[in-house]
Image (tube, helix red, strand yellow):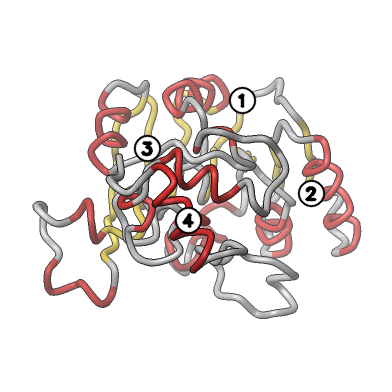
C-alpha cells in the first residue's frame, strides 16, 4: 500500500507535517461539552428505552464514558469490558463521579452471559477482529443482541486516522515512510500500523462483510452511512471510498 516511500516520502512528511496533524481524537467530558450521543445518532432515539431492562456489556469500553451515558439514561446494568487496567480504573472513577457506580462495573472478563453486547468505534482497531466476534458470541446470550458501529474504514479519505494528514495520505505514502515520520513525535517504538496505540487493522468494508459471513452471527440490520459531501456519488462501486460509518445489529446463529 502506498507509492511514495523511502527517504522522499519521509522528508515530505517531516517537512510539511512535523508534529502529526491527522484525524483529531476526542477528548474532555462529552456530557459537559454536550457532544451528540453516538448511541442515539447511530441506533436511534429509542436506544435507551430498548436497553433499559437489559444487562449490557460495552466491549472495549475505553475510559468508560459510554457506560456512564447508558447508566445515566436508565439502563439497569452496564458492564465495561476492557483489557487495559487504566481504562477500567478510569471507568470506575467516572461512574463514582456521576453517581452510577451501582449500575456500572468495569472488568476484564465476565462470567455470566449478557443480553446485549455493544461496540462503538473499535473494530477498525482490533488486532484480530474475527477473534473478537467469537468472544462476543461467548459473552452474549443465545437470544441476545450485538450492536456494532465503527468507522472510518481504511479507504475512507481519513481512514488512516493520525496518518491521514490530508485525504488518503495513508494510501499515498508507504507504511515504512509513515511510521518513520511518526517516530519523530512518538516514542513507543511502533514499526507497523497495528503496533500503534489503539492499533489500526486496515479494515475495509469488503473485509468486514467477509468477517461477518464467517462469524457466529447473522445480520439482522445493517446501515451504511456515506460521507455527506459524497452522498450523490455513493453506490456499491464507490462505498469503499465514501463510507463514513457502518452500524449493525447482529443475532447469534
Q: Position of residue 207 (x, y in %)?
A: 28, 34
Which mark lies nearer to you, 3 or 2?
3
Please name whichever residue, 59 or 123, is drawn nearer the observer in this view of the structure: 123
How far is disc 3 from disc 2 in space, using C-alphas? 25 Å
Above or below, 147 against 93 in this view is above
Q: Give the label on residue 11, or none.
A: 4
Q: Quadrant of the C terminus?
A: top left
Q: Give the label on residue 113, or none.
A: 1
Which mark lies nearer to you, 1 or 3?
3
The residue that disc 2 covers is 103
How far is disc 4 from disc 1 in space, using C-alphas? 52 Å
Give the structural element (helix, strand or loop) at label 2: loop
At a point 52% along the width and 61% down the height, the residue shown is 39
Q: Earlier in the sequence, mark 1 or mark 2?
A: 2
The residue that disc 3 covers is 250
Please name whichever residue, 51 or 198, is drawn nearer the observer in this view of the structure: 198
- How crowded pointer 1 is (Cα within 10 Å; few <14, some 14-19, many 20+) is rated as some
Amino acid at each position: 500500500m502506498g507509492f511514495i516511500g523511502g527517504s522522499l516520502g519521509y522528508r515530505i512528511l517531516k517537512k510539511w507535517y512535523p508534529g502529526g496533524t491527522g484525524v483529531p481524537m476526542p477528548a474532555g467530558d462529552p456530557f459537559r461539552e454536550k457532544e451528540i450521543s453516538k448511541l442515539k445518532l447511530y441506533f436511534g432515539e429509542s436506544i435507551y428505552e430498548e436497553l433499559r431492562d437489559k444487562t449490557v456489556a460495552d466491549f472495549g469500553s475505553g475510559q468508560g464514558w459510554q457506560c456512564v451515558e447508558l447508566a445515566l439514561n436508565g439502563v439497569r446494568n452496564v458492564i465495561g469490558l476492557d483489557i487495559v487496567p487504566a481504562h477500567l480504573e478510569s471507568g470506575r472513577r467516572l461512574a463514582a463521579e456521576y453517581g452510577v457506580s451501582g449500575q456500572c462495573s468495569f472488568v476484564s472478563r465476565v462470567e455470566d452471559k449478557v443480553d446485549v453486547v455493544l461496540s462503538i468505534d473499535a473494530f477498525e482497531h482490533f488486532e484480530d477482529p474475527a477473534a473478537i466476534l467469537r468472544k462476543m458470541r461467548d459473552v452474549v446470550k443465545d437470544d441476545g443482541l450485538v450492536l456494532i458501529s465503527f468507522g472510518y474504514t481504511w479507504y475512507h479519505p481519513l481512514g488512516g486516522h493520525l496518518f491521514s494528514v490530508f485525504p488518503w495520505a495513508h494510501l499515498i505514502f508507504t507504511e515504512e515512510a509513515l511510521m518513520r515520520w511518526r517516530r519523530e513525535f512518538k516514542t513507543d517504538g511502533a514499526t507497523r500500523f497495528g503496533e500503534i496505540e489503539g492499533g489500526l487493522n486496515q479494515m475495509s468494508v469488503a473485509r468486514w462483510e467477509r468477517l461477518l459471513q464467517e462469524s457466529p452471527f447473522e445480520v439482522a440490520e445493517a446501515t451504511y452511512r456515506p460521507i455527506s459531501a459524497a452522498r450523490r456519488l455513493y453506490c456499491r462501486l464507490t462505498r469503499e471510498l465514501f463510507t463514513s460509518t457502518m452500524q449493525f445489529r447482529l443475532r447469534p446463529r
